[in-house]
Amino acid sequence: MKSMIDMMLSSHDQEMEFMPIVPLGEDELNDEEKKNLPTDIPIIVLRNTVLFPNVVLPITVSREKSVKAIEFANTNGKWIGVLAQKDMNTEDPTAEEIYTTGTLAKIVKQIKMPDGNTTLFIMGRMRFSLKELTQTDPFFKAHIHLKDDVYPKNDNEFDAIMSSVRDYSEKILTQSPNLPSEAGIVLRNIEQQSFLLHFIASNINAKLTDKQTLLEIDDLKARGEKLLQILQAELQIVELKNEITNKTRGEMDKQQREYFLQQQLKSIKDELGGDPNERELRDLIKRAEGMTWPDTARELFQKNIQKLERMHPSTPDYSVVYNHLDLMLDLPWSTVTADSYDLPHAQKVLDDDHYGMHKIKERILEYLAVLKLKGDMKSPILCFVGPPGIGKTSLGRSIANAINRKYVRLSLGGLHDESEIRGHRKTYIGAMPGRIIQSLRKVKSANPVFILDEIDKIGRDHRGDPSSALLEVLDPEQNSSFYDNYLEMEFDLSKVLFVATANSLQDIQPALRDRLEIIQLSGYAIEEKTEIAKKHLIPKQKELHGLRKTPTRFSDKVLQQIIADYTRESGVRELDRLIASVMRNVAKNVALEQPITPSITSDKVIAILGQPKYANDIYQRGLPPGVAVGLAWTSVGGEILFIETNHAKGKGALTLTGNLGTVMKESATTALSYIRAHATQLGIDPASFDEYNIHIHVPEGAVPKDGPSAGITMLSALTSLLTGRKLRNYLAMTGEITLRGQVLPVGGIKEKVLAARRAGVKEIILCAQNQKDIEDIDPLFIKGIKFHYVKEMTEVLAIALK
């Protein structure tokens, strides 16, 4: 196709550069589609070209009128009228200086170029005549009359004309030796006669007046006759050029021919017996001429080039030195992208990509504002910490989009070799640069947004500690001189914007954590997940399953049913998979041409996903004495935790089961000691402690559990067991206890509260010092939950026990 275009397209200095594109098999508009076409449209004027129906044309626009017309069209259906101007030298044509017959076009795609111009892909759809210009400033706008083509029916003469048009076009291709013969395949694959006529008319090297005449002819047969005349004239010109070229070539004197042959012979000898390694060296030196790099890098390059010139290509070190030089030439020593610190645009990008997270977005905008004012990267490295599936990594990509930087991601999960960061010494077999240098080589920019994903999951073994190697990378005072073992010199990482992600702070090495500015990301509430599903997940899954044009609607009630009955997560990954399951079912029905209902109902969700996996009926049955509900924080979000207690005749032994950690066992011991000390006040016989063995169990024994936040839950469960009083229904609690009966604050409050709400809890007991954490949560997300803030264990028991 490109060969055909290059052959037929003339080269002119013009305001709109163009190259027609062939959408093979493009159908004509039907009558119903024609009725819906607009008749009042903005107009752009092309210089030195004519757009024909069903031909796609890329054009570069710089005229102010054209730019404004396109902006108007983009907000009004993307329809635009295309007319040609009579004189290509006129810079700002008036109404009298443009033709009145043109083509109604659809804007297919628009690209903003770095030089400020706009490149459009427009597709002609139907011819029109200009009835009147309704506006000339700030751009042309007109009322038009759409013109139908007159198709000949069962006309053998028309078929013969089109066959001749095809033959003449192929002859022009054959007579042009600089073009490959594959271009003829394009012509032979166009079956629709009207489109063949328009495609050839668009690409032929003809006068503007001739092309305009073709466009103004309503009858396709007459249009074909006119095109045939133009092709005949073009073929004569091509044949004449070939004849002159052949004649000139034949008149070359003997000396010129010998010189030409000598040069060819020299080239053949170079190909057969020349030294390819010399060409490699010349290529390296030529590439280095355009490099802007530090003096140390230039000196090292020159030194290795000299070493390479002295080496024989068969020596093992030859490829080692060559690959090292190739790496140096590929690295972006001074290649950077221009930053765009347009904060309103950054705000829009973040809002479009992520729902909610207002405080996080505000922090990111503050960070970008500092970078805009300060102009360098000498600032703490951001680290997003939160449960899986809440958008930590995609936030990094949004930052890159917001400031117009390239994006590169390095997954650190399971990394256990320090050489993965710093690289191997190049003398080793199979040596490679570190992942940092490799990523910069790939992205070809010295200032990308660099995501260090899962920084808390770096391994450590006898091969080294990668997290220690990252200390230099993430220290703004050191990373301007990062040393890679393979590169064997320092590389400046100070322009790179590093963003780390993690699920848990506890697993990050303290020295590394000290270099990070921690930004905590909490899990999503049901309301947030509902909005995320509507704005992001459902449109994405419809696109992935080919259902973009199939009406599929989820009500808020159905989405909340999926979230509550089928998921227990802080993020939205499982929700995304469940929506994908529903979409697959809809896609199957569409493919089988079975009737589908646009609205996804509650019954249909159950039919597709099965019976609900999670239910809150455990609270409706009521809990027996000795069982309490606690709240726990895990790396994947908040969870509810049942504390079960029982006692039997014995000698006062305490048994703890459920895969509990040291801190949690100590909480149980502290709770029992407090109850022993206050047995009389609590109505418990002190002698019973020596007569009964007490057993505390936390279900899901295969899951390790630790932390002090279950302290008040254990004390409440033990008190309930020993007094025989049940705890209130729909009540959960979290907080640390002391031997004196004080309640201390704990962390992860938002995740715990959201987990409680998902589980149907209606009341929560918290330490009074955690009240500030509740005030940070959107009231909408905790609607229906009553909070009790306490300072002493006596207050907890007064609220919890019936």
Image: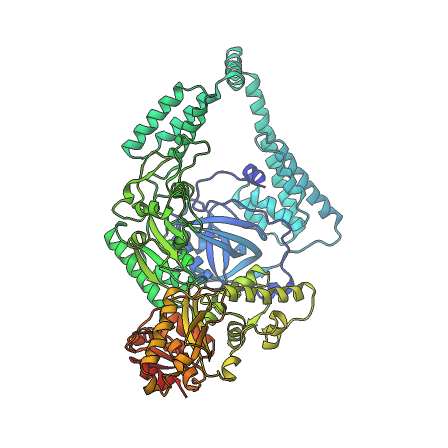
Give percent across and percent down for residue 544.
56, 59
- Of 436 and 22, the residue lying toward us: 436
Name the colour scheme.
rainbow
Query: Is 774 positioned to the left or the right of 319 in the image?
Result: left
Q: Is residue 779 visible?
A: yes
Query: Is 159 positioned to the left or the right of 465 in the image?
Result: right
In the rendered image, which quarter is residue 32 located in? Answer: bottom right
Q: Is residue 608 above or below residue 72?
A: below
In the rendered image, which quarter is residue 290 located in? Answer: top left
Give percent across and percent down for residue 414.
45, 50
Q: How many marks?
A: 0
Give percent across and percent down for residue 542.
56, 63
Q: Is residue 291 above or below residue 112?
A: above
Residue at 44% over, 86% down: 724
In the rendered image, which quarter is residue 312 located in? Answer: top left
Q: Is residue 527 visible?
A: no
Give percent across and percent down for residue 330.
40, 36
- Of 27 and 143, the residue lying toward us: 27
Query: Is 757 positioned to the left or the right of 745 in the image?
Result: right
In the picture, the quarter occupied by the N terminus is top right
Q: Is residue 193 above or below residue 328?
A: below
